[in-house]
């Protein structure tokens, strides 16, 4: 799926480091799962990712100093190293402050599990 051109506009509102971090995350997500549909949600100030089988999987939320990669069913994802933040009943996030901190070896397994989990939940 193509990138949403509105994402560049959304990210232009942020400091260069935040924008570069979000761009790096976009690349990692779409390289790992090219079937994801990327869509900017201006009301949420986010870049959302939807899988054809799993539905809404995750979203990037750029902030003043960091980018959160929020997983819709993050509370259900395996996280043996305790990398996910959040205490709510459903969502969890990975947080990044610099592009070089975006490690595909960390991000992609969470994304893989999130897509698999979402597809399983929707198949019920």
Image (spheres, rainbow, N blue to C red):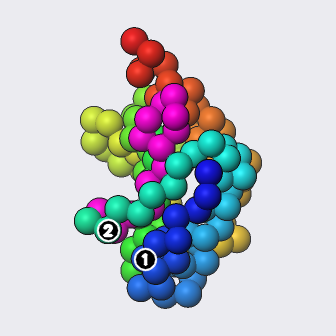
Residue 124 visible in the current orientation: yes
* Residue 33 spot, x, y in % from top left: 66, 44
Q: Judge left or right: residue 14 versus residue 35.
A: left
**In this orientation, which residue lies closer to the viewer: 96 or 72?**
72
Q: How many marks?
A: 2
Read off the residue under disc 2. Answer: 42
For residue 10, the mark is 1
- Whether residue 80 is visible here, answered yes or no, is no
Viewed as shown, does residue 119 lie left or right of 40? right
Crowd tier of the residue under label 1, counting other residues whose Cα lies within 10 Å: few below 14, some 14–19, many 20 or above: some
Mark pair 2, 1: CA separation: 8 Å
The residue sitting at 53% across, 71% down in the picture is 5
| Looking at the image, residue 32 lies above or below residue 77 | below
Magenta span of residues: 44-56
> Main structural element of the magenta stretch: helix, strand or loop?
strand
Q: Please identify the quarter of the rendering in which residue 63 is found.
A: bottom left
Q: Is residue 101 above or below residue 50?
A: below
- Residue 50 magenta-highlighted: yes
Residue at image position (28%, 42%) is: 88
């Amino acid at each position: 799926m193509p990138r949403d051109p509105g994402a560049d506009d959304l990210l232009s509102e942020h400091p260069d480091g935040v924008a570069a971090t979000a761009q790096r995350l976009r690349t990692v997500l779409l390289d790992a799962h090219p079937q994801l549909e990327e869509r900017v949600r201006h009301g949420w100030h986010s870049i959302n990712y939807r899988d054809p089988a799993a539905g809404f999987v995750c979203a990037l939320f750029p902030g003043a100093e960091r980018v959160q990669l929020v997983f819709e069913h993050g509370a259900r994802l395996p996280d043996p190293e305790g990398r996910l933040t959040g205490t709510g009943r459903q969502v969890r996030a990975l947080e990044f402050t610099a592009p070089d901190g975006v490690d595909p070896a960390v991000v992609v397994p969470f994304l893989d599990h999130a897509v698999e989990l979402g597809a399983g939940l929707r198949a019920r």
